[in-house]
Amino acid sequence: MHPIVSIIVPIYNAEKTLARCVDSILNQTYQDYELLLVNDGSTDSSGGLCDSYAARDQRVRVFHKENAGVSNARNLALAQARGTYLQFLDSDDWITPEATLSLVRAAEDHQCDLVISDFYRVVGERVSHKGDIDEDSVLTREEYAAHMMENPADFYYGVLWNKLYRREIVEAHHLRMDPEISWCEDFMFNLEYIRHAQRFYALQVPIYYYVKTKGSLVNSQGLSISKTVRMKLTVFEYYQRFFKTVLDEEEYEKSRLKVYRFLVDAAGDGAVPPTILPGSTRLGSERLQVSPDILAGDSPLHDSFRLRKMLDRHLELVALKHDLPLKDTRLLLYLTQMGPSTSRKDLADFTNQSRSSVTLSLQRLSSRELIKLDDPRREESRKEAARKDEPEKKRLLITFLPAAEPISEDLDGALGDIRQELLTGFTEEEAEACFQFNSRIQDNIRKALS
C-alpha cells in the first residue's frame, strides 16, 4: 500500500533544528504518510540524526548524497516519492500537529489540485500570521493567477512549503526543480505546476512555522550583480510567459502593468521582510498550549480538563479559519447541541461561562449575521412559572442563518476528528465496546445528577 502523502525534507547541516522539524512531522494527527529525508552532503551530525529516525519509524526513508543544492535534493526525493500528494518542509522550520490532515482534507473535500495555506512568520520569540487569499471557495486557475498577480514575488505564492501538490500532475508533466536557478526556483516550479492544475483552494489557517531569514542573493551566494540581474530577468520572462498562457490576449494586455510589477517587487529577492509584522504575538501564545504536568495527571479532574482542551484545540482551527474568537466558536458549537430554544442560564451552565460573557458572544454572533436572536416573554411561560411558584426563565429562540452553514460543517468535522483521535489504535470491536461502556457511564452520571 502506497502512502497518501510523501513529505519531503532536504537537509544540509541542520543538526540544531532537525529534531524540531522531524518531530513535528512524526507527531502529526494524520498518519498515512512517508517522510523522505534527503541528507545533501551535511558535514555535521545531520546524517546520523536522519538514520536514527529511520531506525525508529518505518515511515522514514533516508537518502544520503553529495552536496549539490536544495533543488537537486528535492528532485531526488520526487523521483522516490510514492504518495498521492506531495508536501514539503525546510529543515529549520516546523508544522502544527494538524497540518497534513488540514491539507489533505481540503484537497479531498474540494477535489482540488493545489492547496495553499497561511503560515506563521517567526522572528526570535515573536510570531505573526501571514496569508493572502481570503476566499473560502474553490478557485479556477485564472482566479488563482489573478490573486497571485496582485502580490508578485510574495512568499505565500512563491514557496513550496505552504502547499499540497498532486504527485500525478508532477509526474505526468515531468516537473522538477531547476538546479541552475538559485533564486525563485520554488516559484518557477509553482508556475509550471499551476499551468497544469485546474482547481485551487486557499486554507485560511496557519499551519507552518517559517523561521529562516534570507540574506540578499548577491551576498549569500557570492553571485555578481550582473549574474543576479540576468537570473532575475530569466525568472521574469518565465513569469511573463505563464500569464500569456493562462490569460487570453485581451486579458493579458489589460493586466500587463500588473505583470511587470514583478520586477519591482522582486528587487528585494522575494523575501519575507526581516522585521516582524504588525499584530505579532509571543511565540507559544499564538495557539492553545497545555501544561505537560496537567497532561500527565491522573484523576477525574485531569480527564475532564484534557477532554475540554482537546475540544478547544480543534475548535481553535475553526475559529482561525472563520476569523472568530475561540469563545464565540465554542458557543456556536454548544448552540448546535442545545436546540433552537434555551435560556441564558442554561447556556452559561453548559458552556461554563458567566451570563454576561454568553450575552456578549451572542451579540457578536448576531452582528456577524451568523444567528438570529429572539428573546420573547411568553404568556405560557409566565403561567407555568406561577403554578410552580418559580421565577420565570427567559427563553432564547435562536435561528442559524445561511452564513453559519460552513462554520457548522467545520464544527461537525471537528467533532468527528475528536472521535477519531480518541479511538486511534482501537479495533472495530474495541471501539464498539468502548462506546457501550461510555453509554453506561453517562447513564450513571445522569442518575447521580438528577
Image (cartoon, grey):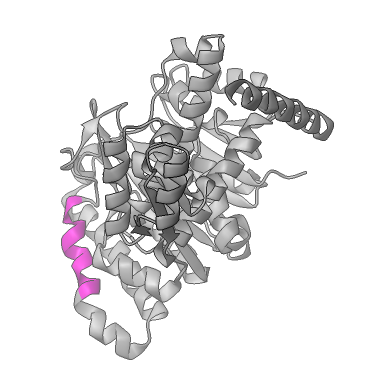
**In the image, is residue 444 above or below residue 293?**
below
Horizontal side, residue 277 vs residue 442: left or right: left
Q: Is residue 309 magenta?
A: no
Q: Residue furthest right?
A: 429
- The one nearer the camera, 29 or 417, is 417
Q: Main secondary structure of the magenta part?
A: helix
Q: Quadrant of the C terminus?
A: top right
Q: What percent of the width, then of the height, locates residue 272?
A: 24, 45
Q: What percent of the width, then of the height, locates residue 428?
A: 81, 35
**In the image, is residue 267 above or below residue 431?**
below
Q: Is residue 266 magenta?
A: yes
- The one nearer the camera, 436 or 270, is 436
- The one nearer the camera, 35 or 409, is 409
Q: What percent of the width, then of the height, locates residue 435?
A: 74, 32
**In the image, is residue 228 above or below residue 206?**
below
User: Picture quarter containing residue 92?
Assistant: top left
Horizontal side, residue 366 vs residue 126: left or right: right
Q: Residue furthest bottom?
A: 250
**Magenta residue span:** 258-268
Horizontal side, residue 74 vs residue 258: left or right: right
